[in-house]
Image (cartoon, rainbow, N blue to C red):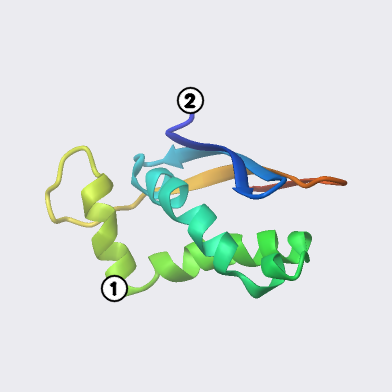
Amino acid sequence: MEDAEINQLDITPGISLFAVFDGHGGPEVAKFCSDHFVPELLSNPNFQNQQYKLALEENFLKMDQILMTEEGLKSLEKYKVEQDGMGTMSGCTANVVLITPDKIYVANAGD
């Protein structure tokens, strides 16, 4: 029942990321996260310093922080099935797997 996913073999050389986002109350937050998760992760200083566990934790919080901004809320409109300008009450769960050459990190948020 996922609304969006990520399946990228090389987000950087030797590192792959797979994720499933299940929207609750609509697909827009799941689709937003699918589009923004990897770019935000790659720009995270802890990711760049190979602190992958911390980077994943911060990236989950970053998705919330972006969505709480006026710009973030406005951007959700493009993901809605019916664009009505009424905002959204949706959210999503996330299951993420980051595979590095020597470890596998699994992170999740939601039920």
Residue 64, given in percent of the width and then of the height, sits at 49, 64
Q: Which of the pair 18/102 is nearer the observer?
A: 102
Q: Which of the pair 39/3 is nearer the observer?
A: 39
Residue 73, given in percent of the width and then of the height, sits at 30, 64
Residue 101, given in percent of the width and then of the height, sits at 82, 45
Secondary structure beneath dot 1 equals helix
Q: Which mark is residue 28?
A: none
Amino acid under disc 2: Met
Which comes sooner in the sequence, label 1 or label 2?
2
Query: Taking the image as drawn, is residue 111 in sight?
Result: no
Q: Which of the pair 48/74 is nearer the observer?
A: 48
Amino acid under disc 1: Glu
Residue in view at x 33 percent, y 66 percent: 72
In this image, 90 relative to 62: left or right?
Answer: left
The residue identified by callout 1 is: 70
Q: Which mark is residue 1?
A: 2
Q: In this picture, is 54 found above or below 12? A: below
Residue in view at x 17 percent, y 55 percent: 86
Secondary structure beneath dot 2 equals loop
Image label count? 2
Q: How many C-alpha atoms fall within 10 Å of the one at disc 2: few (<14), some, or many (≥20)?
A: few
Q: In this picture, is 18 found above or below 49? A: above
Query: Taking the image as drawn, is residue 22 in sight?
Result: yes
Residue in view at x 42 percent, y 33 percent: 3
Specify the quadrant that holds the C terminus.
top right
**In this view, which residue lies farthest toward the front?**
13
In this image, 24 relative to 59: left or right?
Answer: left
Q: In this picture, is 29 found above or below 3? A: below
Q: How many C-alpha atoms fall within 10 Å of the one at disc 1: few (<14), some, or many (≥20)?
A: few
Residue 102, given in percent of the width and then of the height, sits at 87, 46
